[in-house]
Structures are given as structure tokens and as C-alpha cells.
Amino acid sequence: MKKKRVFFLDVNALCYQGNTRSLHSFAHWIFLFFSQVSLSDPVIAVVDGERGNEYRKQILPSYKANRRIFSQHFSSLGRFPRNRIGRSHKLVLNVLHGCNVPVVKIEAHEADDVIATLVEQVISRGYQAVVASPDKDFRQLLSQDVQIVLPMPKCNRWSFYTLNHYIAQYTCDPQSDLSLRCFLGDEVDGVPGIQHFVPGFGRKTALKLLKKHGSLENLLSAAAVRTVGRAYAQDALMKYADHLRKNYQVLSLKRDVDVQIEDKWLSGRNCCNDLVVLSNFINLLRDTENHDGQSKYDPNG
């Protein structure tokens, strides 16, 4: 019997285009998500808690340094005064609540960690979990019971990404993805990869070493006592071991957040309000743009 699906919506990630905050992006992708992807399946939205990234910033000060607080975004839309901090945040939450989506926010925790924790809980209850997010961090969760659905701007649609997709793309297990990303870094989130220090140390070299040693820690431990690769790779592993370990701490999703799934969140979603709620939200953005003399917003891209 096919397992029932529960969707987890990474809200903050959908409110950005790169490092630029965008309510338009949220409106566009949430419209497509409800109408083409989740339909009436349960959806749990998760947003970043206040001071959510402090833990990672203490480890790596550059973490998300290029991102300003999203709740300040709506001050750029002419209808509302610049000092109305949090107005955009309320608008997003109103859309989600209007579409009968529970919203989870845990103080001092990022949404990624809350989602990772809740994913394990729904799997233990016999469900299949689907994480809706463009964030590559979630690849470390991939399994037979965990999928990702990604917004694809070039195709103007969401696309499912599964364990089989990952193995076909990288010819390795997703358990190695976290170790691989420690080498590659994450430019959007301000996590520098090793190629910033050693330009010749790229994906191919990292994959080759990880396939042989299994994990970052196994590789670094081996490099500390013997030669594991070419001279430039060996030198990089010795010199930048601490940097790679910090990347691992920053990129690793925590799965022990103090949050518990509620039974009511797992019920089928009542989607009867979707069209009205989303249309009103899109019209609000369009009206505001017209007020500012900007181009009209088209929810179909």
C-alpha cells in the first residue's frame, strides 16, 4: 500500500530570489504548489524562529551575512510606511492560515532544523515526507521515505527530487551529500567551499575521496596519518581540516529540536479557500506595484 504523504513547506526559502527578498516569489510558488503539487494532502509550513541562525553564526560569522531580515521587506512597497517591520511576515502567515496550513515557528531555531526533526517524526508514524524547498541542505534527508520538491524557475513548475535522482546524479549515497557540500560550500548562505582556498580542489576530487573514505571525518582522520591523494589535495586536507569541520557543523541539519508533531496537522488539507485567498494576495501585490508605478505581477510567470 502506498504511504500517505505529508508536505513540509520551507516558507523563508520561498520568500527569496537568491539573496533578494521577494513577496512576489512567495506568491508565485505558493500558487503553483497548492494548485499542482500538494492539492489536499497535509501541508505543514515552517518559518525561522527569532535568533534562529545565531547558533551557526557563532561557528561561521559569514553564515547568511548577505541576507537582511525578510520581515523588513514590505517597507520597500509604497503602500506601507518603512517603519512597519513585520508587515510582510504577517501577510505571508495570513495566506498560509487562510489556506488551512498550520505554521510552526520555534524560538532560536531555523526552519531547516525544525523540518528535519518533524520529518523523522512523521516517518516513524508510517508517512512519506516531502520537503518543499530550493534549499540543497535537505538532500541529506533523502531516503525511500523522504523526497524533495523543488521550484524550477526555468520550467516555471515544481519538480520532485528523489533518492533515485540523487544517486543517478552523483553516483553516491545521500549520506555522503553533507560531506560533499562541506567541500563545495554554499555561496547563497555564505559558507565558503574549499575551492576558495585551493581552486583546483573541486567536486570531482571531493567525490573521489569521499567514495573511498565514506565521510568527511573518516577522510580527515585518514589524511592526518597517511597520504590519501595527490599532493595538492593532501595539503588542503591538512591545512583546512578545521574549516571543513566548521562547514560540517553549519550545514548539518539538527534533528533534536524540541517540537512535536500534532495529530491534527496530519489530516487532509481543506483547500476550498485557496483560490480566494491567493487571488486576494496577488491582487494586493499588483495594486501596490501599480501604486508605485512598477510593472504588474503575473502569477503565471
Image: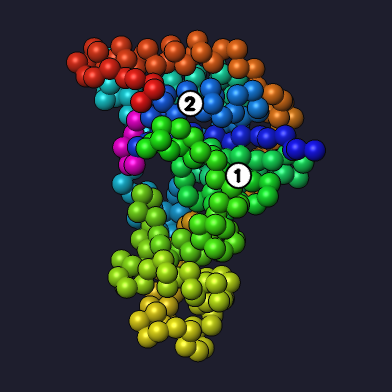
| Residue 257 visible (yes or no) | no
How far is disc 1 from disc 2 in space, using C-alphas?
A: 18 Å
- Left or right? Give the position of 149 relative to 294: right
Residue 242: x and y, percent? 44, 72
| Magenta segment boundaries in residue numbering | 18-23
**Magenta span contains residue 21:** yes
Residue 228: x and y, percent? 48, 84
Quarter-of-image position of residue 8: top right
Quarter-of-image position of residue 197: bottom left
Q: What residue lies at 38% left-to-right and 29% top-to-bottom?
A: 25
Pick out the residue farthest to the left.
293
Q: What residue lies at 41% left-to-right and 32% top-to-bottom?
A: 156
Which of 110/162 is in front?
162
Q: Please, is residue 239 above or below residue 87 in the view?
A: below
Q: Which mark is residue 32?
A: 2
Q: What residue lies at 64% left-to-right and 17% top-to-bottom?
A: 270
Q: Please, is residue 123 above or below residue 236 in the view?
A: above
Q: What residue lies at 55% left-to-right and 72% top-to-bottom?
A: 211
**Magenta span contains residue 155:** no
Residue 2: x and y, percent? 75, 38
